[in-house]
Amino acid sequence: MSGHPFDALRPETVLDAVERIGIACDGRLFALNSFENRVYLVGREGAPPLVAKFYRPGRLSDAEILEEHAFLDELAAEELPVAAPIRDQQGRSLVEIAIAERASSEDSSGNAAAIYRVALFPKLAGRAPELESAEHLEWLGRLIARLHQVGARGHFKKRPALSIERLGDAGLAATLAGPLLPDNLKPRFANSVASLLERVRACFKAVGPLAKLRLHGDLHPGNLLWNDAGPAFVDFDDACEGAAIQDLWIMDAAAR
């Protein structure tokens, strides 16, 4: 696929992709915030809108995405407020769609089709949480505890684990190898991050072994909605296996 991996996603192609999965659209389309993937709110004929997620090519394998979907199914079965994936008539929660790229002025015949992996989810209503409210924080804490109880019942076999090596060491190596940081700043940056990672390792060593469970993985306020029924969790794209504190310290930092 030439160009940016999302070059072929235009409003008409997004709607066409959703309809090829078997959903009749009414023409309404709204792009939602998403850093890694492309996510859209899609209007339906005679039904509430749904969310269509186009996964970034090459970031996660099919098996890793399907583990996320299976975890969401488990949580929904326990009446946790999450958006479990919608399945098509064949029972699939992840569908491959070929979308033809726009033809260039030099080549009127166009380019080869781009392959996208698409998942559909129900839209969860809600507003930004009020993290300064003690009542809301207590409510949220109970709900995270329930999420972790389900997460502790099994393990991810395919999804990447939360670790200092993956997010710290590998992240540092990728930054130093990439073009975003000027070369003259890389030595200082490398020394600073290496020193920080030493302190992180020392903290984990002082605490000792931690139980590992399946987590949301990226539980910041932007992935939390609040409605009349209470909080709801969205975007499990970074679901991983790790220590329970991962789903608490991001939210705790936002509440301070």
Image: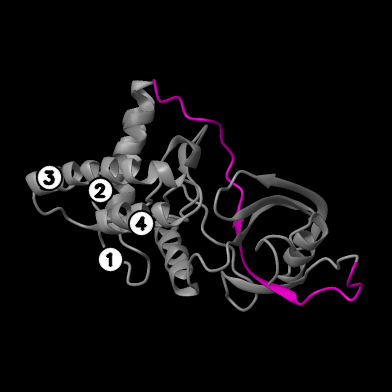
Which one is earlier in the sequence, the residue at label 1 or at label 4? Answer: 1
Which numbered disc flags the more N-terminal residue, 2 or 4? Answer: 4
Question: Mark 4: which secondary structure?
Answer: helix
Q: What residue type is labelled 3?
A: Ala
Check whether the beta carbons of the residues at disc 2 and disc 1 lie within 8 A of each other. no
Residue segment shown in magenta: 106-132
Determine which of the numbered discs, if any, sits on residue 173 in the image.
Answer: 4
The CA distance from mark 1 to mark 3 is: 29 Å
Label 2 crowd (10 A; few <14 / some 14-19 / many >=20):
many
Image position of 62 with respect to 177: above or below: below
Kind of element beneath mark 1: loop
Q: Is residue 191 left or right of residue 216?
A: left
Which of these two is toward me, 155 or 206?
Answer: 206
Image quadrant in which the N terminus is located? bottom right
Residue 180 part of the magenta-drawn span: no
The x and y percentages for residue 194 are: 24, 46
Q: Name the residue under label 2.
A: 244
Among the 4 quarters of the image, the one containing residue 139: top left
- Marks 2, 1: nearer the viewer: 2
Please state the horizontal and vertical placement of residue 137, each as a whole percent of the image.
35, 29
Task: Answer whether labels 2 and 4 touch (C-beta < 8 Å).
Answer: no
Q: Which of 124 and 112 is in front in this view?
A: 112
Look at mark 3 in the image and give the residue it sits on. Answer: 202
In the depicted structure, whether residue 23 falls above or below residue 176: below
Q: Which mark is residue 154?
A: 1
Say left or right for 171 vs 121: left
